[in-house]
Amino acid sequence: MKKKIFIVTLIIVTFLFATNQQKIFVTAEVDGAEKIVAAVAAKKNLPLEINFIHSVQKTPVIEELEFDGEKFILRRTKYKSHGVGLPFMESDGNFHEVDGYFIVDDMNRAIENLSLRTGVGTNLKIKLDGEEFKLYEIFPTGTKIDIYPSTSLKKFFIAIIGRNF
């Protein structure tokens, strides 16, 4: 009997490790619990786009990132008007204007995890690997949205232990 339990346990553990591919998770905090919005395979150069209406300027902002295998890299920001919280210095990247958008290219800012919130009139959307999620239509104002790399096994242990390790 002990041998059967050991073999079954070994098979389960082997299966968990064999299928433990890293993913990019998009989660929302709903009623104190984490709800998974999306989970896609974390491949190098995976595109992520964040679209929103700036809360002060009331104009569109588009942030283009990609996953480098460990973290997100902010590559480009596009926006319609200058203002608070938007890049404008030479050290931010290469600044130019195209079709009414101010664009800052080659920003190359590393970001391990992203935390966003739905806001009043901000129309927060993301595009992850080509699929668009209109977060402002799915969740109420003020909902915390997290985007981060992890594995299913790690998420399982976090759920069991109750904290990140």
Image (cartoon, rainbow, N blue to C red):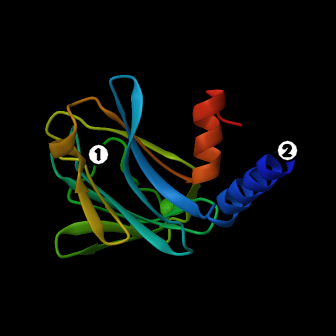
Q: Earlier in the sequence, mark 1 or mark 2?
A: 2
Q: Nearer the viewer, residue 21 or 116?
A: 21
Q: What residue lies at 65% left-to-right and 35% top-to-bottom? A: 164
Q: Quadrant of the C terminus?
A: top right
Q: Position of residue 32 (x, y in %)?
A: 39, 23
Q: Please name the amino acid that badge 2 sits on.
A: Lys
Q: Quadrant of the N terminus?
A: top right
Q: What residue lies at 78% left-to-right and 47% top-to-bottom? A: 5
Q: Is residue 111 left or right of residue 49?
A: right
Q: Position of residue 51 (x, y in %)?
A: 26, 56
Mark 1 to mark 2 CA distance (whole Å): 67 Å
Vertical placement of residue 156 versus 44, above or below: above
Quadrant in the picture for residue 157:
top right
Q: What residue lies at 33% left-to-right and 41% top-to-bottom? A: 84
Q: Please name the amino acid that badge 1 sits on.
A: Gly
Q: Nearer the viewer, residue 164 or 54?
A: 164
Q: What residue lies at 20% left-to-right and 32% top-to-bottom? A: 140
Give the mark count: 2
Could you say whether the residue bearing mark 2 is in a helix, strand or loop? helix
Is any part of residue 41 visible from this angle? yes
Q: Which mark is residue 2?
A: 2
Is any part of residue 57 visible from this angle? no
Q: Read off the residue under disc 1.
A: 83
Q: Is residue 60 left or right of residue 65?
A: left
